[in-house]
């Protein structure tokens, strides 16, 4: 196990997961001295009955829900957050429950900043301290969650607001909230969370506490995703996957953004394809390139959560890194049934790829070598993994 | 933005579930009182508790409850559901009505419910453990094996509770529970 | 003067890198399938250009095509088409333009022109019946569009030219032909990336004679009669220009106000066509030949200037809360000189004003104030200061600075001056239009608000309406005539004139798909048919339009376009205006699903194989 000379780890989030988890909300809020939450969600969650489930869970609590603000959409604007703050204050709310994906979570975090600091100017929070007094915030994970819901970031109007205190107090996972989704969405969300967490526990960033969370997340995602490929998105598998995805947010909050995160964001901005899809496509290529072309390669320990203890113990130490990469690549290949596996397939033009590579070259040339970013993108464009075996 | 488009939502009650849990708690309370007088093991466990022992098992936030404690003679007595004027030494709160339903429809055993953090206990931990053991025995008396095995951690073996003791005790517990 | 009977069918293919050219003869089959104009230009690029090329790279091509009617004297036929891959949107863009260039090219003996490659030094092309000359353009560098045309006019009767915006690769730089423009999508930047300052054509070397002269004369007479008897073409637009739309849109809640936060304004009348006609003593200044005469010029601030068109007045006037027509004219003059699309410039500046208000962007721009706007427009053209970012369009700026919800664009192209929250069919049209938020793909707002024939706030019939108009407009742009001929040629036919209005309304609202089949659109194919001598009826004519639409969509899908891109901006879907007390939301998804179904697209908006086969579009094999 690697222990760096210095590391920091922080997790504020308690996870409540399983049967009737929703019904704990009134009690948990009361224990945080809150009685009147504002629910932040999107119209899809309302339509699918997620909000109804939550309201049912609230029955017999004797408490009042301030309002259901269902304006979360694909893009979170400052205006939306200000409207939520207006509603929060008008109803005298004292806590926030977000249901859905990163959009609901970002609105909830922005809202929390405004109402806890009695402000209407979100821009003043662009640089945030690590300790702040915020209202209780519960994040209810749904099938739209992609990992960053439990992280410490809010993305509002394209700006990132980051602080450890922005992590939710509670992440709640209840299978009643995990509705059926298109397999392409399930797969891309899961692989995106996997990519984030693998990047966060890479050699350069490893610390034992983050590793513990990361490996749990990787194991949950890999195992349950494989199961979902074989038996469909239902039952305990979807709960397991949701847990893995939720934990990935905690992991990525304790590590800086890596190449995969940057690339997928730039690609998404330039092409309107989802960040999750771009991240899923990039995952095996980044790992493969790191394995064969970088000094630190890929961590041997990655094999343990990916393939399990038997395979880990029975593999020679020198081969564990490459076996892990192979296993992840296999997983992504299986996902090819549901999502495209190359940028060519989703028609991203080569000139866009070249310009993105150029814009990130300076930042990553040290860790990935000169031209490394372009090589990764080119490989992901063609859909052919870099040939070769061990480094 | 028109805030009237986002109305407040007041929570309604779950009357039927509350009634069911209330009835179950009443039965359990009365059954503990009856079992004390019928079963030696229950009596031993209960006598081992402190003299001022008073348990308040209730459902948050305003759900049904039951109080069982020692009377002035040290015997187990069911003392109703209202805690006012009583000195509660062991407070076991079931966090919500759904958790109570899980327990009292035996979808989760008491141990599992505790492990799943469905209960908030304040008081002496040994007392709460003793109470759970008492509750397990009472459940063996009250319910058929097929249901009790869901409710308790381990169903007592033949050597721990022979059929004569179980069935005879069951009749006595039921009679004492539902009569005065 | 020599004669061309029908059409020459000859296309010049110019390679700027190698500085040579070849002549391509359009096969008759292609002419029948695509007619000419936009359709044929698109087909020419489909056969020659790989998907995924860099719009500002040498592999991008521009195709110009005059259409078969150019030079025949058909009413409103003085327009030509151009198609290229847009640097603003990254997908195909097509434009229709008046001005003298089309006539000059056609009467030089050429139906069209394809330009590819890139020159190492600034050049311009001189085209005559003898061919193409590559002439040095160093002296023209930095010159504005009008001056450039003046300089080259001595031996040319028609010129297209770019200004400093095009030279500096402003993503929405346009191409001037006279005082008309190939406006949208950044064609000027494409020419600028090729170091191509201008293209001039000698012209007046050939006369164009229709194959069936008598039939042509009859059709021409009919068209002229319709134009002169229609209220819109011979009244509203002829007298007041396109700015007649200001009062109509203000009344109908379509006027963009303050970056599309409002739909009406009390001061809108100050920038209306009626008031400007009186204030500036306007006279005609139009394309040739034109029977509608919508273009006007007037005495503005002591000089004779072109009256800005409605889109300019809308996007650089009411949308910025500026109601001073002199100021709007100043903005228009800058855009004319530098060669910039006023719609995108107006939309981007409106974004900048709102972003500044919200603290997302630093500038001195403010709604309701013209201060600084001229300077910003100059900065955009020169790509300096804040102009460097604003030159990339509102989509780029909003992704960089925030405010994507109020960047009013679709697929990267800024929206025209008709707020779709007042006409849901127009909303669908914007969302699905092939080049982006284009108001000319389908003018649903006209039937919904101006003529009050379809309920603007219902989703019913909108998909059929939009499809019909898209197909028709694509076919018209392939002839080519001005799309404004749609008013007289459709509305003056006996069926439309004499059908009781209530009957029309019921049919359009409940059975638009069926009602459209009864619309008499025979005049357009008759004109084409009489010029070429080839048969063309209404059904085939409309089929051509459908074919062009599907082809354009296929080319865009090859660039990555799918359902995720067919969406209106957040503001238009989720925010409501004071003028709409009922807060009606645009039912985008329902209309989109229906649209895809009747177009023969799958649920991702990609044309299905059967529709591609039906349209006789062959698999792309780049030559």
Image (tube, coloured by chain):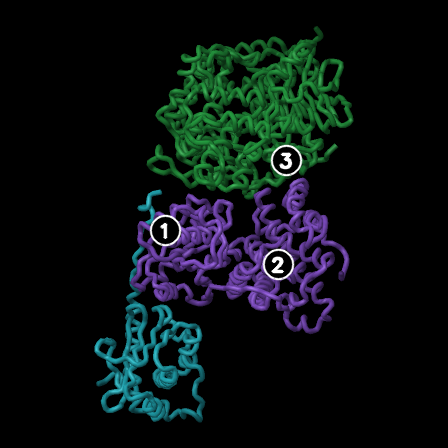
Chain colours: A purple, B cyan, C green
Mark 1 = which residue?
A: A118
Mark 2 = which residue?
A: A199
Q: Chain of mark 2?
A: A
The CA distance from mark 3 to mark 2 is 37 Å
Q: Is residue C192 above or below residue A99?
A: above
* Callout 3 and callout 1 share a chain: no
| First of labels 2, 1 by sequence position | 1
**Between C83 and A265, the one nearer to me in the picture:** A265
The CA distance from mark 2 to mark 1 is 37 Å
Return the x and y of residue C225 as percentages of the image width and height: 49, 10
Q: Chain of mark 1?
A: A
Return the x and y of residue C227 as percentages of the image width and height: 49, 13
Q: Is residue B169 left or right of residue C68?
A: left
Circle 1 SS class = loop
Q: Are marks 3 and 1 in contact (CB under 8 Å)?
A: no
Q: Is residue C434 above or below residue A376?
A: above
* Callout 3 and callout 2 share a chain: no
* Callout 2 and callout 1 share a chain: yes
Return the x and y of residue A89 as percentages of the image width and height: 33, 51
Q: Is residue C234 left or right of residue C618?
A: left
Point out the frontmost of discs 2 and 1: 1
Residue A284 visible, this angle: yes
Residue C555, disc? 3
Q: Give the crowd class for mark 1: few <14, some 14-19, many >=20 residues within 10 Å.
A: few
Q: Are marks 2 and 1 in contact (CB under 8 Å)?
A: no
Q: In this view, which residue lies farthest toward the top?
A: C1
């Amino acid at each position: 196990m690697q222990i760096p000379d210095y590391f920091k780890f922080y997790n504020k989030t308690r996870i409540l997961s399983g049967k009737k988890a929703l019904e704990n909300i009134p009690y948990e809020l009361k224990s945080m001295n809150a009685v009147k939450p504002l629910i932040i969600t999107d119209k899809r969650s309302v339509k699918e009955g997620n909000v109804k489930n939550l309201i049912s869970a609230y029955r017999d609590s004797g408490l009042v829900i301030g309002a259901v603000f269902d304006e979360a959409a694909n893009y979170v604007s400052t205006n939306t957050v200000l409207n939520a703050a207006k509603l929060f204050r008008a109803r005298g709310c004292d806590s926030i429950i977000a249901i859905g994906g990163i959009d609901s979570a970002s609105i909830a975090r922005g809202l929390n900043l405004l109402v806890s600091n009695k402000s209407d100017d979100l821009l003043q929070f662009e640089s945030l301290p690590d300790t702040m007094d915020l209202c209780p915030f519960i994040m209810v994970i749904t099938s739209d969650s992609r990992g960053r819901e439990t992280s410490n970031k809010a993305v509002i109007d394209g700006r990132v607001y980051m602080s450890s205190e922005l992590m939710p107090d509670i992440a709640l996972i209840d299978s009643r909230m995990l509705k059926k989704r298109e397999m392409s969405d399930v797969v891309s969300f899961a692989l995106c969370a996997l990519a984030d967490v693998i990047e966060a526990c890479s050699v350069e960033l490893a610390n034992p506490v983050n590793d513990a969370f990361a490996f749990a997340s990787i194991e949950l995602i890999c195992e349950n995703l494989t199961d979902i490929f074989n038996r469909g998105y239902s039952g305990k598998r979807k709960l397991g996957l949701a847990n893995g995805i939720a934990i990935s947010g905690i992991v990525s909050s304790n590590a800086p953004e890596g190449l995969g995160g940057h690339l997928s964001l730039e690609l998404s901005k330039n092409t309107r394809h989802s960040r999750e899809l771009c991240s899923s496509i990039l995952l095996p290529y980044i790992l493969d390139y790191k394995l064969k072309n970088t000094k630190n390669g890929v961590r041997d320990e990655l094999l343990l959560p990916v393939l399990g203890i038997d395979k880990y113990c029975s593999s020679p130490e020198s081969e564990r890194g490459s076996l892990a990469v192979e296993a992840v690549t296999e997983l992504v290949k299986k996902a090819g049934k549901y999502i495209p596996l190359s940028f060519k397939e989703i028609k991203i033009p080569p000139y866009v790829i070249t310009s993105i590579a150029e814009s990130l070259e300076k930042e990553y040339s040290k860790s990935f070598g000169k031209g490394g970013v372009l090589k990764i993108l080119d490989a992901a464009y063609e859909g052919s993994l870099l040939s070769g075996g061990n480094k | 933005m028109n805030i009237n488009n986002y109305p407040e939502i007041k929570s309604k009650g779950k009357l039927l579930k509350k009634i069911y849990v209330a009835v179950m708690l009443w039965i359990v309370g009365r059954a503990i009182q009856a079992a004390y007088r019928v079963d030696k093991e229950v009596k031993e466990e209960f006598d081992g508790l402190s003299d001022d022992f008073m348990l308040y098992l209730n459902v948050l936030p305003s759900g049904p409850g039951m109080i069982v404690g020692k009377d002035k003679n040290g015997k187990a007595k069911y003392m109703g559901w209202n805690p006012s004027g009583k000195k509660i030494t062991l407070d076991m709160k079931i966090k919500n009505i759904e958790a109570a339903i899980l327990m009292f429809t035996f979808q989760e055993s008491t141990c599992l419910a505790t492990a799943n953090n469905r209960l908030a206990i304040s008081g002496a931990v040994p007392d709460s453990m003793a109470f759970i053991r008492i509750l397990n025995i009472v459940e063996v008396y009250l319910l058929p094996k097929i249901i009790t095995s869901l409710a308790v951690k381990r169903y007592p073996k033949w050597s721990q509770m022979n059929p004569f003791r179980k069935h005879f005790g069951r009749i006595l517990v039921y009679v004492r529970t539902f009569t005065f | 003067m020599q004669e061309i009977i029908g059409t020459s069918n000859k296309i010049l293919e110019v390679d700027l890198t190698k500085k040579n050219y070849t002549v391509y003869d359009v096969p008759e089959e292609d002419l029948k399938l695509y007619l000419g104009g936009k359709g044929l230009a698109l087909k020419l690029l489909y056969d020659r250009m790989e998907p995924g090329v860099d719009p500002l790279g040498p592999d991008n091509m521009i195709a110009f095509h005059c259409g078969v009617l150019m030079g025949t004297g058909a009413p409103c036929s003085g327009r030509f088409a151009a198609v290229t891959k847009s640097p603003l949107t990254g997908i195909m863009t097509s434009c229709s333009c008046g001005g003298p260039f089309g006539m000059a090219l056609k009467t030089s003996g050429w139906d069209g022109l394809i330009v590819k490659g890139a020159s190492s030094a600034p050049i311009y092309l001189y085209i005559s019946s003898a061919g193409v000359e590559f002439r040095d353009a160093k002296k023209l560098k930095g010159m504005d569009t009008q001056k450039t045309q003046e300089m080259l006019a001595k031996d040319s009767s028609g010129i297209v030219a770019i200004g400093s915006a095009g030279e500096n690769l402003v993503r929405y730089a346009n191409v001037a032909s006279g005082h008309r423009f190939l406006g949208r999508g950044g064609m000027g930047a494409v020419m600028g990336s090729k170091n191509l300052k201008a293209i001039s054509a000698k012209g007046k070397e050939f006369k164009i004679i229709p194959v069936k002269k008598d039939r042509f004369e009859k059709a021409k007479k009919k068209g002229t009669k319709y134009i002169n008897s229609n209220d819109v073409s011979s009244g509203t637009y002829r007298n007041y220009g396109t700015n007649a739309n200001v009062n109509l849109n203000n009344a109908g809640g379509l006027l963009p106000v303050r970056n599309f936060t409002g739909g009406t304004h009390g001061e809108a009348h100050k920038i209306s066509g009626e008031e400007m006609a009186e204030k500036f003593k306007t006279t005609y200044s139009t394309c040739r030949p034109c029977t509608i005469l919508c273009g006007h010029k007037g005495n503005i601030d002591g000089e004779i200037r072109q009256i800005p068109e409605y889109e300019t007045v809308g996007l650089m006037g009411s949308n910025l809360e500026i109601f001073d027509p002199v100021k709007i004219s100043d903005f228009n003059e800058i855009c004319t000189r530098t060669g910039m699309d006023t719609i995108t410039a107006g939309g981007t500046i409106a974004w900048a004003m709102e972003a500044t208000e919200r603290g997302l962007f630093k500038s001195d721009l403010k709604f309701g104030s013209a201060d600084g706007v001229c300077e910003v427009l100059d900065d955009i053209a020169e790509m300096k200061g804040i102009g460097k970012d604003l030159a990339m369009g509102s989509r780029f700026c909003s992704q960089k600075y925030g405010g994507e919800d109020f960047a009013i664009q679709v697929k990267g192209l800024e929206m025209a001056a008709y707020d779709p929250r007042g006409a849901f069919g127009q909303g669908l049209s914007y969302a699905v239009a092939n080049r982006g938020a284009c108001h000319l793909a389908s003018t649903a707002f006209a039937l919904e608000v101006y003529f009050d024939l379809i309920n603007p706030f219902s989703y019913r019939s909108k998909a059929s309406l939009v499809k019909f108009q898209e197909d028709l407009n694509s076919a018209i742009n392939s002839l080519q005539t001005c799309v404004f001929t749609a008013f007289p040629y459709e509305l003056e036919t006996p069926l439309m004139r004499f059908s009781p209005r209530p009957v029309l309304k019921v049919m359009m609202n409940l059975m638009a798909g069926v009602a459209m089949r009864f619309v008499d659109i025979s005049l357009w194919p008759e004109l084409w048919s009489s010029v070429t001598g080839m048969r063309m009826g209404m059904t085939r004519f409309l089929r051509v339009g459908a074919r062009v639409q599907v082809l354009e969509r296929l080319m865009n899908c090859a660039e990555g376009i799918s359902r995720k891109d067919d969406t209106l901006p957040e503001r238009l879907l989720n925010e409501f205006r004071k003028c709409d007390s009922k807060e009606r939301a645009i039912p985008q998804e329902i209309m989109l699903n229906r649209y895809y179904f009747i177009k023969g697209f799958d649920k991702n908006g990609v044309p299905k194989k059967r529709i591609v086969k039906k349209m006789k579009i062959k698999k792309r094999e780049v030559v």
